[in-house]
Image: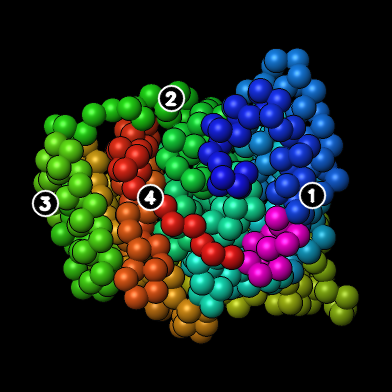
Amino acid sequence: MELCDMSLFKLRQMLDEKQISSVELTQYYLDRIKELDCQVESYITVCKEEAIIAAQKADKIISEGKSRVLTGIPIGIKDNICTEGVLTTCASKMLYNFIPPYSATVIEKLKEQDAVILGKLNMDEFAMGGSTQTSYYKKTKNPYDLTRVPGGSSGGSAAAMAARLAVITLGSDTGGSIRQPAAFCGVTGMKPTYGAVSRYGLMAFGSSLDQIGPLAKSSRECAEVLNVISGWDVHDGTSSRNNIDFTSELDRKIKGLKIALPKEFFGQGIDEEIKDVVLKAVKKYEEMGAEIVEVSLPTLKYAIPTYYLLSSAEASSNLSRYDGIKFGYCTPKSKTYEERIMRTRKEGFGNEVKRRIFLGTYALSSGYYDAYYKKALYMREKIKEEYARIFESCDVMITPTAPTTAYKIGDTYNDPVKMYLADICTVTVNIAGLPAVNTICGYSKEDNMPIGMSIVGKAFDDAKVLGVAHAFEKDFTIKSPSL
């Protein structure tokens, strides 16, 4: 078996037993990136020297018998998570030269375990998109089919994971940005409960929606990573003091579990093959002893407008700081203060970012606040109420992660409505602040592309969600892309 196909736990054992050093493992991944990433284009920045230095330090820790779960493990980081001294661009021209003076809390926690950061991964610009084609720097490809998108906005994180260009990657999820690319690229991706992982150092798209989470080969690996990066943070007022042991239910029994199956997620707009594959996976749970309960989530029809009004409003506020004065891109052509700001934002932001700023500013304007933004806030509460009602009698919910498999590059790039509607299966989880994991449950017959299902739980039931996913993964064989 190739090193890149080994689990986090096997690599941990090999490192601790001195069968391989962290320097050798890190160099192995750096060589893979050099060889394969010219095809996949998942990395914006590769930290060759910094990674080797970190690996040397990790080897010393291992030799002293003080290693922990991620010591010496090579990890890739989405490029909207701040890394001190390392270029962090959000895949935007606006931050083409931004080197943060501090690291995000999740990065500090990885460093405390002496993990090795390989580099920064491509994404949709400022996390706005579902294809990783809005990046200013490169267009990431799907390792299963290089003519298809990897999904987004964490497409670089998912593609690098699928192509085995890191042992673990981190992404961020605003409306499905970990789970959808994980489904498209055939890997496991977890969006934890809102507040479970600190957002300090994450360049926010939608502050009330964003969560950092891991992408890995399995839900068990995701659980181990979340145990490292989660927890209350003095720097983040939205972080929770609820301490979750994400590994505590990995061996849970499925017998007696009540699984909600919302009929709206299997209706019009969802590809028939997607429905069939997900329902076959549900049947497996039924064979394990689970009880399947058909439920309804009527507010699903309002999910897309609710999500895009809320997220765009927050984006228009969050992105107002990029004015060409404090940091980042600044146009050289301006004559006045006002012209500098206008030209900087016009030249520094891509079309999708501008579109969402316009939408958000419009929704927050005095004449339309009550008509749009206030109604979106009302619908958010209704969606939360419907989930709460379902979880009164059910343990978890299962839905498709995306309405289709990965589509061809260019198919929705110039059609924002089509791109936005593709988020229908994922956005309600972020609106309600719930935990959800994508796991692969099958492959399309015609082109062998991965199909993912999402397992959703009530707030802070992350361990249960991961345990349910793990029960399915134990008897399911993942197909690797043939790069």
Q: Which residue is mark 4?
A: 477
**What is the secondary structure assignment of the residue under circle 2?**
loop
Establish if 201 lies above or below 418.
Answer: above
- Tell me the kind of residue under disc 4: Thr
Between disc 2 and disc 1, the foreground one is 1
Q: Could you say which is closer to the camera, residue 362 or residue 447? A: 447
- Tell me the kind of residue under disc 1: Cys
**What is the secondary structure assignment of the residue under circle 3?**
strand
Q: CA distance from mark 3 to mark 2?
A: 30 Å
- Tell me the kind of residue under disc 3: Glu
Q: Which residue is mark 3?
A: 294
**For marks 2 and 1 on the same chain, the one whose residue lies earlier in the sequence:** 1
Queried whether the magenta region covers residue 342, the answer comes back as no
Name the residue: 23% across, 71% down: 272
Residue 103, position in %: x, y? 72, 40
Q: Which residue is mark 1?
A: 47
Range shown magenta: 32-44
Between disc 4 and disc 3, the foreground one is 4
Instruction: Classify residue 223 as left or right of residue 297.
Output: right
Name the residue: 61% across, 34% down: 11
Q: Which residue is mark 2?
A: 245
